[in-house]
Image: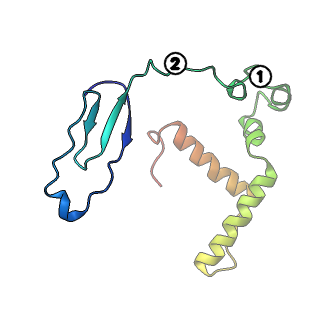
Amino acid sequence: MKSGSVSASVPAPVPAAVSASVPAPVPAPAQEVSRDGTVWDFVNASVNPPRRTAAQNIMKETPGSTSHTKGNIDDESALSAFRLLINEPMLRHIKTCTETEAHRQLNDNLWSMTLEELYAFIGVLYVRGAYGSRSTPSM
C-alpha cells in the first residue's frame, strides 16, 4: 500500500440483478479498492502544503503560576493548592448531590456525610492515584 493520505469515493449502487455480472472496479495506479467496493484515491501530502496556524490557536500567556496562585498557596499545606482547584462551594454541591443519590438508591433519608469525610475520601483517592495503589491496601 502506498504512503500518504487517502480519501474515499463510494461507487454508485448497482441493482442486485446486475451486480453479479458486473466485474469489480479496476483500480487506477493511484487508487485502491476495498472489499466492499469503495474506491480509495491516494492524495499526495505535498500537493496541499501546510498553512499557517490560526491566531486563535496560539497561546500568548506567560507559562507558570499566576500571581493569584502564588499569593494563595501556603508552602506548608497541599490543601491550599487543592482548594484553588476545588473550592468549598463545589464540595458542598458534591456533598448535596451524593447525599441525594444515596437517599434515592438506599431509600434511607438518614444517610449523610460531612465535608471533612468528603475531603478525606478525595484525599484517599488522590493518594491511591499518586502512588499507583502499590503501597495502599485494597478497599
Chain-order first, disc 1 or disc 2: 2
Q: Is residue 119 left or right of residue 17?
A: right
Give the secondary structure at mark 1: loop
Name which residue type carries label 2.
Pro
Question: Going 34% across and 33% down the picture, which residue do you hit?
Answer: 41
Looking at the rendered image, the disc whose residue lies closer to the viewer, 1 or 2, is 2
Question: Going 80% across and 51% down the picture, which residue do you hit?
Answer: 88
The percent coordinates of residue 123 (x first, y second) are 63, 46
The percent coordinates of residue 26 (x first, y second) are 20, 38
The label shown at residue 49 is 2
In the foreground, 123 or 45: 45
The percent coordinates of residue 53 (x first, y second) are 64, 22
Asked if labels 2 and 1 touch by Cβ distance under 8 angstroms, the answer is no
The percent coordinates of residue 38 (x first, y second) are 30, 45
Q: Which residue is mark 1?
A: 61
Give the secondary structure at mark 2: loop
Name which residue type carries label 1.
Glu
Q: Quadrant of residue 70?
A: top right
Q: Quadrant of the N terminus?
A: top left
Identity of the residue furthest to the bottom in this view: 107
